[in-house]
Image: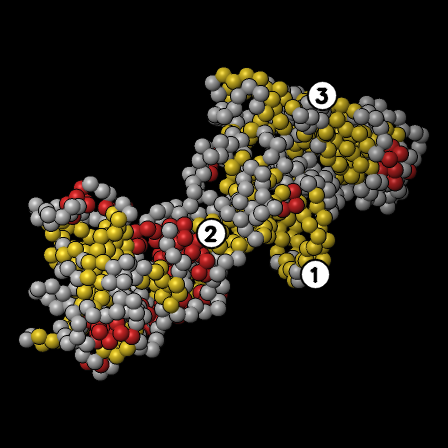
């Protein structure tokens, strides 16, 4: 309700008192023109003025409603003014010789006879001439005046452009420089110095010096690009093909896969966290694919406050990274592991061994065959999905043992592969354990390797191997072709079975090649003369060994290992210390930051920039209410103010000339009681109707606590509160407006619960809507006031429109009220 001087209120309430005076003040190119429907002099107000009698008719000063629950409300009115051809300038001159829309326009109410010093004219509408500037004939000018809401039609924020940031990330061009309010988590920073970015359209090897890039824009001779861990100096550019010096800046040339990102190398990468100073950076996270790593410790952070500014970007919150980071910088984690393992798994072994080996020999053999099949513990960096151990013996004293405790990289049905990485060999270790007891005395052993390139392969390669311990030997190389073949080492002498214990076989690919290993085992030759049996054996003479033992055929493994049951984990892992791990500069960098602001400051951030006064808050906001988040979209200032207001359970609108936040309540005391309404021969000027059924909302799924790293939508919110009104659903059917309840700037649970309670209570019913007229006695009433309708049994109602109607020769001065039942 407007606050007027006591004398002014008394004059407005006196139906037989002084006549009301309506005044239009137009400021055109700095000159003020005071216009009315008659010539009235007002001394001591703005230096003393006499109204120009140019108003022929007044329109109603009404508030138009926008669509949606958080609608934009604008007060406006239409005027018809007379062209006084004897005046210079007249209204025709003002609208044709000047841009009248660039000035201001205000409408005042006053009463003749009041002291303009103690009871000056009061502002009813403050704004500017906007639409409907029209000269319909030689005698008239039509104008529309709109309140100051138009000053918030400008868009908030600054977009990233090449003109301002020539080295920005192409993905960030056109994005808004973030504006942070209070706390924000996982907010993507804008890459403003990242260099050119492209990718490999095909795989390249470590020796290629000329290759194509998907896009060479921004790259030239002398540019340095980085692909994975390798830097390259560009020597020439032709089309999309570049010739380069590999392994530049002491990096190592290596193979790169199709789609690998190629970045222009910079000594500093710069990211914009906010277009203004902030209080603190709470964390900086780098995203590589689906992985997130904390890179705070390797970042130089500038809050943008005085004394803490990046020299090239003063007043902005900046993250600086030391070049292209791709390797772990430091790891210092102290782990307090409180996890207990409840293992209820059973091992079901269905592996079967089919042995199709055939023996060709010239020696009679007493053959005892034993098969031991067991699983082994795995450790190390190279894992396998299956472990095999099998032995067999024959009468000529030769048996073979295979135990792959570690396989090379991933052992699949197609084989195992050891790649050459840089100049270091990818090495797999095979350990021979001693889980068996065999008869006889071993005399010597050798290694067998089944090699050959993968199916479809076409490259020969080398396999290198050596062993450890007292039976260690120098490095051996096996060269092999595409065809799969079995290669044997030399025979090595042993004297007991225990000599085989813990032999480790080291296998790796030869330098500059790939190694494919399909199978390996150890063959042992032993003397059967020391063998014991359960039956009598007659020994005579000696045994002459001639020829050899030919092994042919394969060992087929079928079946698998099934795990039954589940693994239950209990407890927690507590991490302390700090972890700085690798990130790919240019991928998403997420910011956790704080900029403490009161709710009024959030509005003033936009209002003052638009040239408007600071916001006035009518009512009291709950303590839990706080706008927290970031402006990352390109929207008008009025859109942001209305969005903020809706998430604060409030209305935002211009009240006279002041931006105002009106806190909404389900139940509020009446400001004043209206005992009657205007009557005529037809009776009361009163109409009643129910609010539209389309306005009913009886199901709300309120989503809040936004993850700013995600695009807006249902998945972008980490918290949801749901509610419904069963009676409303029974009365009107289920009705929901989900898009209205995506609350980006709400993070507090109590805040969200309050909003759910209010909006469900307010919109689950269809209130009665009343429209009636009254004299200027109640002209101080305005939008948002709660009144008691004395002529309707004291019904409490909230004003949703207060329309002022300046009088003329045909109509009385009046105010028209549109209000709704208070739920």
Residue 742 position, x and y percent, is 40, 57
Q: Which residue is mark 3?
A: 479
Q: Provide the secondary structure element on which disc 3 rests.
A: strand
Q: Which residue is mark 1?
A: 338
Residue 211: in sight, yes or no? yes
Residue count near mark 1 (Cα–Cα under 10 Å), binned few <14, some 14–19, many ≥20: few
Instruction: Give whichever of discs 2 and 3 has the lower sequence position.
Output: 3
Residue 373: in sight, yes or no? no
Q: Nearer the viewer, mark 3 or mark 1?
A: 1
Q: Which residue is mark 2?
A: 630
Residue count near mark 3 (Cα–Cα under 10 Å), binned few <14, some 14–19, many ≥20: some
Distance (Cα) linking label 2 and label 1: 38 Å
Quadrant of image for the C terminus: bottom left
Residue 233 sits above or below residue 42 on the image: above
Residue 78 position, x and y percent, is 17, 55
* Near-viewer residue (278 or 520): 278
Distance (Cα) linking label 2 and label 3: 62 Å
- Which of the 4 quarters of the picture holds residue 52? bottom left
Q: Which residue lies at the image location 51% right of the left edge and 37% below the top edge?
A: 192
Instruction: Give whichever of discs 2 and 1 has the lower sequence position.
Output: 1
In the rendered structure, the answer to whether residue 391 lies left or right of residue 750 reads right
């Amino acid at each position: 309700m407007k606050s007027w001087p006591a004398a002014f209120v008394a004059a407005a309430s006196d139906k037989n008192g002084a006549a009301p005076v309506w005044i239009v003040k137009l400021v055109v190119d700095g000159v003020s023109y005071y216009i009315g429907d008659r010539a009235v002099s007002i001394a001591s107000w703005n230096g003393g003025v006499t109204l120009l009698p140019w108003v022929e008719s007044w329109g109603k000063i009404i508030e138009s409603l926008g669509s949606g629950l958080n609608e934009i409300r604008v007060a406006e009115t239409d005027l018809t003014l007379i062209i006084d051809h004897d005046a210079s300038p007249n209204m025709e001159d003002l609208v044709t010789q000047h841009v009248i829309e660039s000035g201001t326009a205000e409408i005042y109410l006053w009463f003749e006879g009041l002291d303009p010093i103690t009871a000056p004219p009061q502002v009813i509408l403050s704004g500017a001439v906007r639409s409907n500037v029209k000269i319909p004939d030689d005698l008239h000018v039509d104008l529309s005046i709109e309140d100051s809401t138009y000053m918030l039609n400008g868009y908030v924020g600054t977009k990233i452009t090449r003109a301002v940031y020539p080295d920005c990330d192409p993905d960030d061009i056109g994005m808004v420089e973030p504006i942070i309010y209070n706390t924000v988590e996982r907010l993507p920073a804008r890459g403003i110095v990242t260099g050119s970015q492209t990718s490999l359209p095909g795989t390249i090897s470590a020796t290629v010096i000329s290759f194509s890039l998907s896009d060479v824009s921004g790259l030239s001779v002398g540019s340095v690009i980085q692909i994975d861990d390798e830097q390259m100096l560009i020597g020439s550019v032709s089309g999309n093909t570049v010739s380069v010096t590999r392994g530049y800046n002491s990096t190592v040339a290596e193979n790169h896969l199709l789609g690998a990102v190629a970045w222009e190398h910079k000594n500093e990468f710069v990211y914009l966290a906010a277009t203004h100073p902030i209080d603190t950076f709470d964390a900086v996270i780098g995203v590589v694919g689906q992985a997130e790593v904390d890179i705070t410790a390797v970042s130089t952070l500038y809050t943008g406050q005085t004394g803490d500014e990046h020299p090239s970007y003063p007043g902005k919150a900046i993250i600086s990274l030391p070049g292209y980071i791709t390797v772990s910088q430091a790891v210092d984690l102290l782990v307090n592991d409180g996890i207990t393992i409840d293992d209820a798994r059973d091992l079901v072994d269905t592996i079967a061994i089919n042995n199709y080996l055939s023996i060709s020999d010239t020696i009679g053999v007493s053959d005892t065959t034993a098969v031991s099949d067991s699983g082994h513990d795995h450790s190390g960096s190279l894992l396998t999905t299956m472990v095999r151990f099998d032995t067999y013996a024959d009468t000529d004293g030769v048996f073979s043992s295979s135990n792959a405790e570690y396989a090379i990289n991933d052992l699949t049905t197609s084989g195992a592969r050891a790649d050459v990485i840089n100049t270091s060999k990818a090495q797999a270790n095979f350990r021979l354990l001693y889980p068996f007891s065999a008869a006889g005395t071993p005399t010597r052993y050798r290694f067998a390797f089944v090699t050959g390139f993968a199916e479809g392969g076409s490259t020969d390669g080398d396999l290198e191997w050596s062993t450890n311990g007292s039976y260690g030997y120098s490095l051996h190389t096996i060269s092999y072709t595409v065809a799969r073949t079995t290669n044997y080492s030399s025979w090595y002498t042993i004297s007991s079975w225990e000599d085989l214990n813990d032999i480790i076989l080291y296998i790796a690919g030869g330098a500059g090649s790939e190694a494919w290993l399909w199978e390996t085992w150890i063959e042992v030759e032993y003397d059967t003369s020391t063998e014991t049996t359960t039956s009598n054996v007659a020994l005579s003479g000696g045994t002459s060994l001639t020829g050899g033992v030919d092994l042919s055929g394969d060992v087929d493994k079928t079946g698998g290992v099934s795990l039954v049951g589940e693994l239950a984990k209990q407890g927690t892992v507590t991490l302390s210390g700090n972890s700085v791990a690798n990130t790919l500069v240019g991928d998403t960098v997420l910011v956790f930051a704080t900029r403490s602001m009161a709710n009024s400051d959030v509005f003033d951030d936009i209002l003052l920039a638009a040239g408007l006064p600071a916001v006035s808050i009518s009512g009291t906001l709950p303590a839990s209410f706080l706008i927290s988040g970031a402006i990352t979209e390109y929207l008008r200032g009025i859109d942001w103010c209305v969005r903020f207001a809706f998430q604060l359970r409030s209305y935002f609108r211009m009240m006279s000339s002041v931006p105002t936040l009106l806190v909404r309540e389900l139940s509020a005391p009446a400001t004043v009681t209206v005992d009657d309404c205007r009557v005529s021969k037809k009776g009361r000027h009163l109409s009643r109707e129910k609010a539209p059924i389309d306005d009913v909302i009886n199901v709300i799924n309120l989503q809040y606590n936004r993850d700013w790293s995600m695009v807006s939508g249902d998945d972008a919110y980490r918290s949801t509160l749901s509610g419904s009104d069963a009676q409303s659903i029974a009365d009107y059917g289920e009705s929901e407006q989900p898009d209205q309840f995506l609350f980006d700037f709400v993070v507090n649970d109590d805040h969200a619960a309050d909003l759910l309670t209010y909006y469900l209570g307010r919109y689950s019913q269809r209130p009665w809507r009343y429209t009636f007229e009254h004299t200027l006695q109640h002209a101080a009433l305005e939008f948002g006031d709660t009144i008691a309708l004395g002529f309707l049994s004291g019904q409490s109602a909230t004003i949703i429109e207060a329309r002022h109607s300046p009088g003329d020769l045909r109509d009385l001065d009046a105010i028209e009220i549109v209000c709704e039942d208070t739920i």
